[in-house]
Amino acid sequence: MNLFDRLAEMGHEQVVVCHDKAAGYRGIIAVHDTTLGPALGGTRFWNYASDEEAIIDALRLARGMTYKNAVAGLNLGGGKSVIIGDNRTVQREMIFRAHGRFVDSLGGRYVTAEDVGTSTGDMDFVHMETDYVAGLAGASGDPSPVTAHGVFRAIQASARQVWGRDSLEGRTIAIQGCGNVGHYLAQELSEAGASLVVTDIDPERVKAVVNATGARAVPTEEIYAQAADIFAPCALGAVINDRTIPQLRVQIVAGAANNQLLEDRHGDELESRGILYAPDYVANAGGVINVYSELAGWSRERSLRKADEIYHTVLNVFEIAQQDRIPTYKAADRLAERRIAAVRSMVKTWPQWPNKAS
Ligand SMILES: NC(=O)c1ccc[n+]([C@@H]2O[C@H](COP(=O)([O-])OP(=O)(O)OC[C@H]3O[C@@H](n4cnc5c(N)ncnc54)[C@H](O)[C@@H]3O)[C@@H](O)[C@H]2O)c1
């Protein structure tokens, strides 16, 4: 890999390779773009097969955070870090404290949080060394209600786009995953008058949603072929793929799961079948809004209000898709790029106070 060519191609500002022998720590911090604000993105702890694989993952994830934070309308840039190693290790304190020191050394250009393989307890270790960390135990609290509300608003916007009105009264919605987000989403949808079909690999979680909303439960593999209006993936990524798309009998796909499209071409395939896709990172932005609330000192009500705006953002994405004749997942990227470009040019026009000393 030619690193600098890769950085130029993907638009990264900075990559920091970090090492602390005593702590047994090997980490990479990737700062993609700080036009909008400090680069925010979690720390992934993973046993990568090679250093190159770890660097590429950090670069890819950091870039994704720039787009996610930009469309969420937050004053945050995009970054991400990875720690190379076995994330089941019990020797965590020194690894995460070492990581915290390197995060601190960037002086606030990068702010970290939890991601795959890390927990709130790990972030407490990071916090011993730096204040540039979010997602601490007892801070902003469970993000799921905010995320679920944002997904609910994305579903309303999708309904408006397809049927001309927000109302979900009498619509059937198939929800995959009755976990934290799925449960709250099911409640909001049920209160809005929708009929629900739900599934989960965990029967207890299904039972809780069925009891709370009167949803109909189906086996996990049958969720794709349900005759419903909307499919809401709220479990795993990559569920929109060659095997599942031919089974879908819905007009809208809108849910909370990250990376729902196995590959970009599956977004094209939904489009060609006339299924409207609310891009995942736009719909589930409530998660990052909740992290921001911790940094900015927002109340839960203010976070929910910000998540409410996801309705307009999703409609904006659909408008760009129509105007530019591109699939919605590409339109979401375009919206993010436009916001970054607009803010970049706005900063240039700021009046500068003359420096009298020179
Ligand atoms: N929690 C948040 O605020 C947030 C924010 C942004 C994105 N997301 C994404 O939304 C999704 C759900 O998040 P969550 O916090 O509710 O997670 P969770 O772990 O609480 O819930 C996921 C649920 O999916 C179920 N599941 C796993 N495999 C399944 C399968 N094959 N079929 C059906 N169900 C299956 C699990 O049993 C679990 O109940 C994840 O993809 C997550 O990355 C969550």
Image (cartoon, helix red, strand yellow):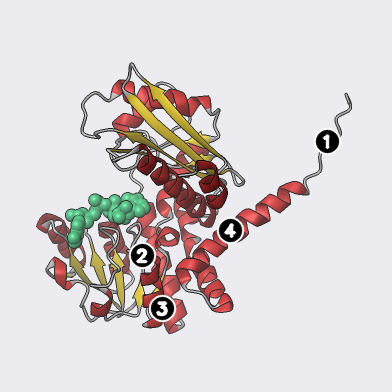
**Which residue position holds label 2?**
263
Distance in Å between CA atoms under marks 2 and 4 = 21 Å
First reached walking from the N terminus: tag 1 or tag 3: 3
Q: Is mark 4 within 8 Å of ligand 1?
A: no
| Kind of residue at badge 3 | Glu
Whether residue 346 sits left or right of residue 326 in the image: it is right
| Kind of residue at badge 2 | Glu
Distance in Å between CA atoms under marks 4 and 3 = 22 Å
Distance in Å between CA atoms under marks 4 and 1 = 29 Å
Judge by depth and name the residue closer to the eye, 288 or 167.
288
**Which residue position holds label 4?**
337
Binning the other alpha carbons within 10 Å of mark 2 as few (below 14), some (14 to 19) or many (20 upward) gives: few
Q: Secondary structure at mark 3?
A: helix
First reached walking from the N terminus: tag 3 or tag 2: 2
Q: Quadrant of the C terminus?
A: top right
| Kind of residue at badge 4 | Glu
Give the answer, above or below, for where 248 lies relative to 185: below
First reached walking from the N terminus: tag 4 or tag 1: 4
Q: Quadrant of the N terminus?
A: top left
Distance in Å between CA atoms under marks 1 and 3 = 50 Å
Distance in Å between CA atoms under marks 3 and 2 = 14 Å
**Which residue position holds label 1?**
353
First reached walking from the N terminus: tag 2 or tag 4: 2
Q: Position of residue 85 (x, y in %)?
A: 28, 33
